[in-house]
Amino acid sequence: MGRAQFEYDEVGNTFYYVLVSFYALVLIPATFFFWPSSKLDKIERKEHCYCEGCTDKRIKAEAKRPWRRTKKFLTFLALALAWILFFIIVRKVTQIEVEHTEYDPYAILGIDQGAASSVVKKKYRELSKTMHPDKGGDPVQFDRIAKAYQALTDDESRENWEKYGNPDGPTATTFGIALPKWIVSKEYGVWVLAFYGFVLMVLLPSAVGFWWYNSIKYSIDQVLLDTTEMYYYFFHKTPKMEINRILMVLGGSFEFWRQYNKEIVERESDDTELPPLIKQFKNLSENKKERPLCLPYSLKARFFIHAHLSRFAIDSSNLRSDCAYVISKCVMLANEMLAIAQHLCFYGNPARCPSLDTIENLAKLLPMIVQALWPKNSPLLQLPHITEQNLHYFRRNRIITCADLANLNEIKRRQVLQSLSDAEYNDIVFVLQSMPRLNIEPRFEVQGEDDAQKVTVGSVVTLKIVLTRSPLLDSNKREEEIREVGEEEAEPVEVVGDEEETNEEKDNNAPKRKIWEKPKKKQNRTKPTKNRQGQKTKLIKKPVIKSEENNKEKLEEQKKNRKENNDDMETIGDSENEEPSGSEKGYVKDENEKENGSDFEVMDESDNEDWTNENMAKKNPFWQVGVKRPIQCTVLTSRAKNSSGGGYCLLIRSFVSWSCQQCIAQHSLMSRRWK
């Protein structure tokens, strides 16, 4: 059997068709996948939170944008060059001339289409006289003329020509290999074969092996399988885990060990910087010998988690970058731990499956990491600019969660946060508007039944849940409240005051206070006692002056009153014109402290109003329970008891009046506190 002969493209025309086909097969999907998006990566909001954490986050995002823009430009440039090359190849293909010509006997003889047989014979005789080989003609050309004459005169040849395009009948068509001939030449054949061998036998298997051996290390959630196995082991070992134990297991994840993760950076400075910081945390359990929780990488990761939850400031920039990397992995690992616990509850050993407390603690873990708060901390601390100092005032106003703060009206919310500036207050409002308010509507039904709401024994019950998400703080409602406040401020308000306020001059050029700000206290003006009895003013703590002559008598009266009321209280004086003596001088204030803004000043009508509103904001003020009529103070001096209008109360250390309900209410409040 002879060796097969292959015809290669001598000119290279057919090779361009193959090249443009495979090139388009790769270029079109690559363009669709790598083309830079014309849309913005993130829609920039008109408002931002300008707290320290959000500002740092935006700075880091801005630092990555130059490289992102450079990458986008390089990708666009590479795709543009690839398409330019594609159009060059297409243009080359369109310029290739087709050498195949259709066989036409009329054109060979030089006569018109459909000429008669007599015309064909006449033309053939004329050409034979000049083109015959015996008369010096071209034998190839004469052979073509003879074949054309036969095709037009012979019935069988004419039928073959009309049917197959050739007088001789059907013929085979030969196609060559669409590769240039130099590829298989002796000069370049060895190099081409070596290139094929490198691509198909070295490069491709290496790429597939590298991808495979890296992919089998991770689960579908990109968590190391060794870490997953460690979670299974500890959940089986200790089914009931507290928060601290869960954090220990989380810190022992192999993602934080350089042996498994090459992104981890180990520095020599860690040996000197970490030990002093670790000693400040008492719950790290660094002395435990349980592997791998006792290894240095685990202790370092555990410290970063505790520092993040405690909002501990780390001075070293290297440690801060390591802490940020560890916390970025914790969200993914916390979800993996929760998924493993659920898997063990459904398919594991019932005797060793995680307890309900463990699953509850795992569910708390993700919010803890996101909010950087321990479970014992108030959820209000996740708001910007809120510190521990603000929580005491929040508790007084029955504000426990972020929803309680969002449910307040604009005036009350601004009054609660009056210690913050307008910019800080806007940051809190922005965060509250970003938080979700979830409305869950569950519904049970038996599908396929006429009465789907009726559940019988053995029925397959389907639970359908409609989850509606809305902002925690409605911006439209807030705008309406602000508009109403503005309208109320614009309306003229008739001020009805006491006899003292109607007589004093008012400054029309004084700046108008904001609705959430407290009114400024007015200067103390001395008035006769007769005119001040009808006013609703409260004396908060007036200076008491005693004399040395009546010390013994007053002390005996105080001891007698303490015995009658069974109250253990310190004694102070009861007369304005007496001097203090002994240890009682600590309670005496100078008269000049009134002008300096001390506690010894008279509360005017506006202060009484603020004090009353603050107490009315509480849902059930305990001091109002049972107070239906005026009560009398039982801890009064003898002089006070004999007075008709009131007296000095030793319990609240102030003057009380039987006609002033606020004094009686404060007395009742202080009585309950002392008891």
Image (spheres, grey):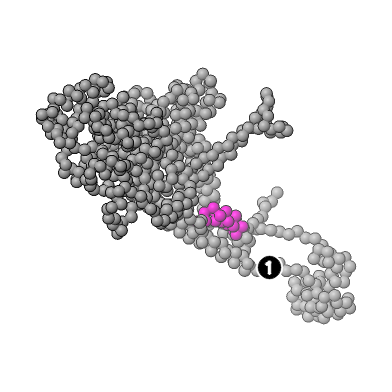
> Which residue does the image show at 23% across and 25% down from the upper left?
569
30 part of magenta stretch? yes
Q: Quadrant of residue 186?
A: bottom right
Depth check: give the residue in front, 272 or 585: 585
106 left or right of 268 in image: right
- Residue 455 seen in the current view: yes
Depth check: give the residue in front, 670 or 637: 637
Residue 631 x, y percent position in the rendering: 33, 30
The part of the chain drawn in magenta is 19-36
User: From this viewpoint, which residue is outermost toward the left?
Assistant: 549
290 part of magenta stretch? no
Residue 299 x, y percent position in the rendering: 34, 31
Mark 1 sits on what residue?
99
Quadrant for the C terminus, please.
top left
406 left or right of 184 in image: left
Question: Relative to 193, is 97 above or below?
Answer: below
168 left or right of 363 in image: right
Q: Quadrant of residue 649?
A: top left
Depth check: give the residue in front, 266 or 159: 266
